[in-house]
Image (cartoon, rainbow, N blue to C red):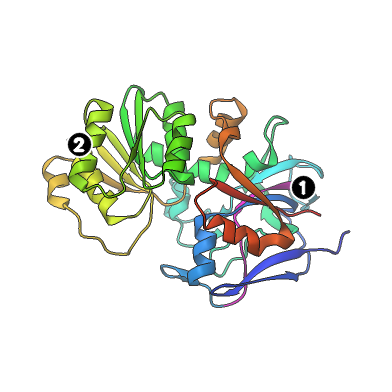
Amino acid sequence: MPEDNLSAVLYGVNDIRLEQREIPKPADNQLLISVNTVGICGSDVHYWTHGAIGSFVVKEPMVLGHETSGTVADVGAHVKGFSVGDRVALEPGVPCRGCEHCKTGRYNLCPDMKFFATPPIHGSLARYVVHDADFCYKLPDNVTSEEAALLEPLSVAVHACRRAHVQMGQRILVQGAGPIGTLCMMTARAMGVAQVAITDLDMGRLELAKKLGAEHTICVKGMSVVDVRSAVIQSLGGEPEVTIECTGAQSCMESSILTTRSGGVIVMVGLGAPRAELPIIDSAIREVDIRGVFRYANCYPTALNLVASGRIDLSGLTRAHYKLDETLEAFKRAQQADVIKVFISCQK
């Protein structure tokens, strides 16, 4: 059994340390995973720079990372269907399985969810990690380790599109062309929408979104919410039936309400300030539904099938690569907007 379990541990604001930790032993229902690839998420960066996200506060050292793929290194006594050497993607949240939310299929709302790198639960940015076998998914040969790590943000996009009831032939607006917004755009296209317009402040990200399938890109830098509304309607040839808001910015939430067609749906994916002043009466009198999105539930299999079948091609996403001992440099790179995803390879 190997002894090296180098791990990236957050001790506090701007304090990431690389240290050796004991290799965990899998419980009867768990797998020991030799971690291959971890993608850095905006939440990882936020914990690093702020030490908290809302009520989730880093009070003691915590291993970072939750977008994970790896290889089975050991199998718990009661686990069936997995063998040492299987390549897997890890869905990072393990719910209680017994509460009302879990029993009705909305386990993402479980109050006892244990989610990688959400305090006080350790994450996966390490050489080895244990995880419940129920939330590990075997990978076909044509899905790479990086694509498997991307199943986590792709599952957010799948959940957002499901919450919005995205349908074939619709006009869709996506606010924000970062990793989640870009994946929402690609997922909506895979579901057969007619047109997607995507907004952002960064021309580089908009150009990439165009290459990846967005029919319309709109740089909203310096634009008022009224100007954004006009530009979106002109681009799509009408108001969008669905708006997927991925920025968390108040101005984008406001323009989402003003732009979405009467009777349409807005899903709030991006998380910004805890309070925002919005034209809520406008949405009420036009029956524009505003729906929250929190992580995902029952979406990993769909995300995996979309990638394995080629319905969603992730190869065009710009990326940067680092080794585990380069974690600090990787986090600094993730703060920039020049690539969609930064990956860390966790094996030597």
Any mark on residue 230, and which?
A: 2
190 or 95: nearer the viewer: 190
Residue 52 screen position, x and y as percent: 47, 70
Residue 23 relative to residue 341: left or right: right
Residue 74 relative to residue 195: left or right: right
Q: Residue at x 28, y 49 (%)?
A: 252
Residue 99 screen position, x and y as percent: 46, 56
Q: Secondary structure at mark 1?
A: strand
Cα separation, mark 2 vs mark 1, equals: 52 Å
Quarter of the rendering occupied by the N terminus: bottom right
Q: Nearer the viewer, mark 2 or mark 1?
A: 2
Q: Residue at x 26, y 35 (%)?
A: 232
Amino acid type shown at disc 1? Val
Q: Residue at x 33, y 63 (%)?
A: 273
* 248 part of magenta stretch: no
Residue 344 screen position, x and y as percent: 67, 53
Quarter of the rendering occupied by the C terminus: bottom right
Give the class, few, some or many, for how many residues have Cα within 10 Å of label 1's Cα (few <14, many ≥20): many
Question: What residue would you read off at disc 1?
Answer: 72
What stretch of residues is rendered in magenta? 60-72
> Taking the image as drawn, is residue 265 in sight?
yes
Any mark on residue 278, and which?
A: none
> Taking the image as drawn, is residue 212 in sight?
no
215 or 67: nearer the viewer: 215
Residue 281 screen position, x and y as percent: 12, 50
345 or 155: nearer the viewer: 345
Residue 202 relative to residue 337: left or right: left
322 or 19: nearer the viewer: 322
Amino acid type shown at disc 2? Ser
